[in-house]
Image (cartoon, grey):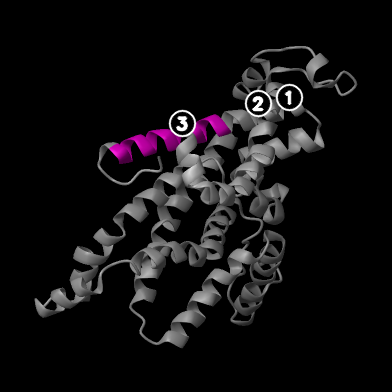
Amino acid sequence: MPKAILKHKFIYLMILPTFIYFLVFSYVPMIGIIIAFKDIQLFKGIWASPWVGLEHFRTFFSSIQFNRLMGNTLTISLSRILFGFPIPILFALLLNEVRIGVFKKAVQTITYFPHFLSWVIFGGIIYNLLGPIGAVNLILDLLGMEKIDFMTNPSIFRGMLIVTGILKEFGWGAIIYLAALSGIDGTLYEAARIDGAGKLRQIWHITLPGIRSTIVLMFVLSLAGIMDAGMEQILILANPLVYSTSDIIDTYVYRIGLQESNFGLATAVGLFKGVIGTILIVLGNMIVRRTGERSIW
């Protein structure tokens, strides 16, 4: 092992800053998990506060809000995976067929630009478009049609969350698939054309198999975030009228942790969410590895 480190010392030096970053900001703070098992009293500190064991977990699981929070979180997350996961793939496939370089770069830039906008800015754009006096409702009113309550109707609001979340990120997600598409041998397409294969057959028999490992890898990674339903987006756009369909575990943790200062319960709920995400990504990676696809580890 020491010989291998010395042989590749410059590579290890390159990854050292990243290692230190994750050590300091991801692994060292994990010591704070102990808060989930204590009744935190600020004047006593973390270590001197009384131990309560699994009391915070029992409180959360027996809460009347548990079913609603889990239902909303899973519904929003699974809907984003179901509808949002294929869109970057389809967009990358379509963009890969464009032969006009300037147009292709312009479309790619426009679609992935929203990724770099914070939800504060993007949420303001959405509100100006879909709010009660937004552009969409003003147009509907001018056409003599009934206005749509995007921001106050609980069922419509959930769909709006899913759609706007996908619109913000699909262009950025397509970059990974475009990079994978660039690695496919062009002679395969030439041979397919000689054999009389059309575009759809080329995509089905060459393109999709060529990026299959990337698709599987991204799907496994998406499983880790199945308990993340977009807290920042919901905090920016939601209001009390739509909490029934938009209140998720992360917003619950925000309220009880920062607003009500119940740090023990908030940490316990966050730990529960993290454990579920870890189990899902480990199981997903195990299944992928056993099917012969490229796994994360």
Look at the picture and state if 42 lies above or below 114.
above
Q: Residues within 10 Å of mark 2 (few under 14, many from 20)?
A: many
- Whether residue 65 appears in this view of the structure is no
Question: In 3D space, how far apart are the residues under numbered discs 3 and 1 (Cα atoms)?
Answer: 23 Å
Which labelled disc corresponds to residue 201? none
Look at the picture and state if 15 lies above or below 280.
below
* Front disc: 3 or 1: 3
Q: Quadrant of residue 283?
A: top left
For badge 2, the amino acid type reads Ala
Sequence order check, earlier mark of 2 and 3: 2
Question: In 3D space, how far apart are the residues under numbered discs 2 and 3 (Cα atoms)?
Answer: 17 Å
Is residue 272 or residue 30 the one in the foreground? 30
Q: Quadrant of residue 153?
A: bottom right
Tag 1 secondary structure = helix
Q: Quadrant of residue 180?
A: bottom left
- Whether residue 90 appears in this view of the structure is yes
Q: Residues within 10 Å of mark 1 (few under 14, many from 20)?
A: many
- Which secondary structure dominates the residues rendered in magenta? helix
Q: Position of residue 23 (x, y in %)?
A: 64, 38
Q: Position of residue 118 (x, y in %)?
A: 68, 61
Judging by the rendered image, the residue that carries numbered circle 2 is 268
1 and 2 marks in contact (CB < 8 Å): yes
Residue 176 shown left or right of residue 119 in the figure: left
